Image (cartoon, helix red, strand yellow):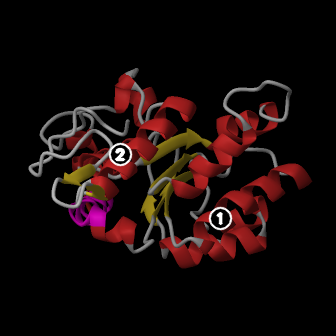
Amino acid sequence: MLDPDFDCPNGCDANGFLFDEERRQAYPCSCREERLRRRLHGDMEASVGRYAPPRFQGLDWSALPLSGIAERHGAAATHVRRYAAGVEQNVRSGRGLWLLGNKGTGKTTLAYYVAQQARATGMSVLTRNTTDLLNELRDSYKPDAQPTTRQIIDAITQVELLHLEDVAVPRPNDWVLEQLYTIVNRRYEHNKAILFTSDTPYGAPLDPGGLADHIGERTYSRLMQMVGDPILMTGADYRLTVGA
């Protein structure tokens, strides 16, 4: 059964089939593709988790924290709002987004807003802190691990929008570099969008090219083709100034 709660105007069954009484033959309804897509999304969320923790759900520009980010980082907020307004077209064309800047400037909140808007259109979204994702992949090699390596890789490949937090945080070694390449290359080959954030220490220059030293040149090259120039966000850590 694909989706018993799906409201089909054609009156098909829960698997997306209609029955021709004259021919005594079942045939797929026009909604079956959408039912299959929803089932896939549901399976991914069941196996690898929800798309956003409570702090980053229900984001709205009329309320904090988005309203505060818009005041402090108007150019970045405008860029994100423009991308989010056309999120379905952007994601389906494989066009991603990179938020680069200092800690506590609102990069994560803006990224979750984009993920929220993508999900509101019916697209599947998978969000992971990059370190957590790598740890999950490492743990998935253990016997009887859940989710399995196959489930994680399938989700990474098939989900319509992959949102990765703190891409520059994992300490690089051969295994980490290879996993990051696999993740990005899978998305690259399937023309699937990636949304990601990365930090630069406060006071240090924002150097997009510095990410290549951390994740590897071949991974960086693919990412740049997928996301274009980063959205830059500088300033002090807002979480520390307000005690949040």
In space, the residues marked 1 and 2 are separated at their CA atoms by 22 Å
Amino acid on which disc 2 is placed? Arg
Q: Nearer the viewer, residue 52 or 108?
A: 52
Percent of width and height locating residue 71: 22, 48
Q: Total label count?
A: 2
Q: Is residue 157 above or below residue 139?
A: below
Dominant secondary structure (helix, strand or loop) of the stretch shown in magenta: helix
In the rendered image, which residue does mark 2 sit on?
A: 38
Which residue does the image show at 26% across and 33% down from the upper left? 4
* Residue 201 visible in the current orientation: no
Which residue does the image show at 35% across and 45% down from the upper left? 38
**Residue range (magenta):** 76-88
In the rendered image, which residue does mark 1 sit on?
A: 186
Q: Is residue 98 above or below residue 59?
A: below
User: Which residue ends up furthest to the top in the rendered image?
Assistant: 243
Does residue 182 appear to the left or right of 227 in the view shown?
Answer: right
